[in-house]
Image (tube, helix red, strand yellow):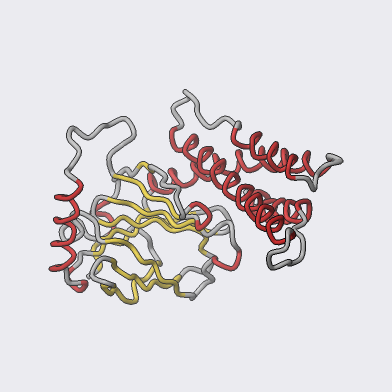
Amino acid sequence: MMKNKHLVSGSRFVSLIVFISWTLLGLSVWSSVTRSQKRQTAPNPQTFMEEIDALAERLQPDNVPVWNMTSSVRLIKIEKVENRFLRLTLQNAYDKKINGFQVSVGNVGIHTEFMYNEDQMIPPGGTWVQQVPIEPYTDTKGITFMSVHFADGTGDGDEAAIKIVEEERAGQITQIRRALALIRRTLRAPNADSVAALDELLSQIRSLPSQGKNGRDDFWAGLESGKKRMIAIIDELRQKQDHSTYRAQGFQIQSDISISRELTEVVEKHERVVSRR
């Protein structure tokens, strides 16, 4: 059941980025409550989960209202998975590659970011699967396709939702450029392949600014997002180096990890991203 997109135009979603294991997958989640608002009371976690479980149990996918604010994202199929998730099969009916998508489920919005991986972008006519959790009010507020974003930098859908992504992406790109400058400086150092250089680089990236008072909340959220992404990447390389050292001490010896080669690959990959902006 696809509703007219104008029924929900003008809604404002502000992202509260969740970075756990989703950081490198480019998945962010936000609440419909604005950053300046605070909830009056926090729900009891056990009661909250019981209510969600009860909702998920009775929810029938065919009865979930679906609102589409885009012109050419098509819903092919909606299914319930493990009694806790909804799996949406979607099609890109535009003539451009999709590199980002925003959908709200009940009171919660989800932004999936494909811009960091060319292979994940959805080509014209291509389909993809978006699995989302069943959230409060999914049975009444349903699912809304808020906006879609393209590899050429344009977007389609709710104007406010598009602006949020544009601001956040601007923040991410700004921060990634700063991190790349630090990585290049590390690569030029005589000890570029040392753990000490890697630790120093990690400390420098952690020190990058990601807060401000200019009112551009989404931009600053993007700065924080970009910083956490780069920290996660360098930290993963640091852990790989630790594992390599462990193996070299006599446990399952494998080829050494070249820090400079790995850092060069990080630069090359992210240069392609920032050059598109």
* Rendered-image quadrant of the N terminus: bottom left
Rendering coords of residue 246 (x, y %): 68, 57
Q: Residue at x 70, y 36 (%)?
A: 200
Q: Nearer the viewer, residue 37 or 94?
A: 37
Residue 211 in the image: above or below residue 108:
above
Q: Nearer the viewer, residue 163 or 184?
A: 184
Q: Residue at x 34, y 76 (%)?
A: 76
Q: Residue furthest top?
A: 213
Q: Nearer the viewer, residue 183 or 106?
A: 183
Q: Residue furthest front?
A: 250
Give left or right: position of 43 versus 15. Answer: left
Rendering coords of residue 67 (x, y %): 27, 61
Residue 99 in the image: above or below residue 206:
below
Rendering coords of residue 56 (x, y %): 18, 65
Q: Residue at x 53, y 38 (%)?
A: 223
Q: Quadrant of residue 199?
A: top right
Give left or right: position of 219 versus 191. Answer: left
How many marks overall? Answer: 0
Q: Residue at x 29, y 51 (%)?
A: 108
Give left or right: position of 94 versus 119. Answer: left
Rendering coords of residue 96 (x, y %): 54, 66
